[in-house]
Structures are given as C-alpha cells and as structure tokens.
C-alpha cells in the first residue's frame, strides 16, 4: 500500500533534481547587469495590473472586438487566479532561495511559494486570448509570454517547471475563455 506513494515521492524528487540542475545552469549565465535589468522589465510587464489595459487599448484602437476581448480575459482570469492560488498554497513548493541554501534571487517574490508561476500563467492566458482576437500578433505575444517565464527563472524566483506549469495553465484557461464565448 505504501509503494505507490514511494514511487510518487521518488518521481517528485527526480523532477526536483532535474529542475535544480536546469535552474543552476541558468543561474551560471546571468552575470551581465543589462540582462538582469531586461529580465526585471520583462517580468514586470506581466504584473497583473497591466492586463485591464489590453481591452482598453483595443477599444481605443477602434476594435469592434474590444468587449468580447474584455469578457474572454475576465472569464479567463476569473478561472486562472483561484486555480493558481489553490495550487500555490496547496502544493507549497519552496522558491529557489528557500530550496537551495546560499542562493539569493535578484528580486523579492510577491508571495511565498513557487509552483506554479503566476506571472507566466497570466502572460500565457493573455497571449492566448489576445492572439485569438488579433492573429497577426500571435508570434509576438507568445514570444513575450515565453520571455516572461524565462525572466522569472533568470531572476531566481522560479524553477523551470514552475514556469512550464504556468504556461500550460495559462494557455489552457485562455483557450477555455475563448471557447466559452464562441
């Protein structure tokens, strides 16, 4: 009866070990001050208070889709934020600075736990929804969302799997938000 739990625990330890190796590799490549500055700017671009500006910009640009864009984003974030909070506070994965003795991140995280990355899930949700309304921006939007995730790792506040999970959650819920309105 204890075997499935033991296998599950071993798998989590292996994933964490690979995560630490990938994280350490990334940290060895972050010595340039300009790169750190760019990572901070990219990370801040995914702070939640910017997302309400998206439909406002669409409206100001004269888009007939602005109200639908607003509804899709609102629905997506109404699902994503509670899920993010339940996962983060339920799983309670330590951030790199707590999990790796002697490590210090470049920025102070906004909350205690690491998994999943809320910045990344929000960025991928927004990218998915906006790309559905403005397909010509798809590549730029997903490039930005990917850079947000990378910045969170390079700033030392997330492991790579935190960001990967955030991307999957955000893109999936963004797709649900769009599908619900169609």
Image (spheres, helix red, strand yellow):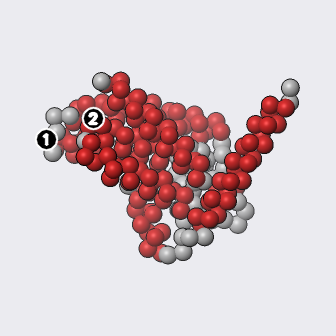
What residue sits 52% from the left and 33% below the top? 83
- Judged left or right of residue 165, residue 9 is right
Q: Residues within 10 Å of mark 2 (few under 14, many from 20)?
A: many
Tell me whether circle 1 and circle 2 mark residues in contact (CB < 8 Å): no
Q: Which mark is residue 69?
A: 2
Placement of the C terminus among the 4 image quadrants: top left
What residue sits 60% from the left and 70% below the top? 28
Q: Give the farthest residue toward the bottom.
A: 32
34 shown above or below 116: below
Mark 1 and mark 2 lie on one chain; the one further toward the N terminus is: 1
* Residue 1 placement: quadrant: top right
Q: Position of residue 166 (x, y in %)?
A: 51, 43
Residue to which mark 1 is pinned: 62
Secondary structure beneath dot 2 equals helix
Q: How far separated are the C-alphas under marks 1 and 2?
A: 13 Å
Q: Give the farthest residue toward the left.
A: 62
- Judged left or right of residue 175, residue 152 is right
Q: Residues within 10 Å of mark 1 (few under 14, many from 20)?
A: few
- Judged left or right of residue 138, residue 161 is right
């Amino acid at each position: 009866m204890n075997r499935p739990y033991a296998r599950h625990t071993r798998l989590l330890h292996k994933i964490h070990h690979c995560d630490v190796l990938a994280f350490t590799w990334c940290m060895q490549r972050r010595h340039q001050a300009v790169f750190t500055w760019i990572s901070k700017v990219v990370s801040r671009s995914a702070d939640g208070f910017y997302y309400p500006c998206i439909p406002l910009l669409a409206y100001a640009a004269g888009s007939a889709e602005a109200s639908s864009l607003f509804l899709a984003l609102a629905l997506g974030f109404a699902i994503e934020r509670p899920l993010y909070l339940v996962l983060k506070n339920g799983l309670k994965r330590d951030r790199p600075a707590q999990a790796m003795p002697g490590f210090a991140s470049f920025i102070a995280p906004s909350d205690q736990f690491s998994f999943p990355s809320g910045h990344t899930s929000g960025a991928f949700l927004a990218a998915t929804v906006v790309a559905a309304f403005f397909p010509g921006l798809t590549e730029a939007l997903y490039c930005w969302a990917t850079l947000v995730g990378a910045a969170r790792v390079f700033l030392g506040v997330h492991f790579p799997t935190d960001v990967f999970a955030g991307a999957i959650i955000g893109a999936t819920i963004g797709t649900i938000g769009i599908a619900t309105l169609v």
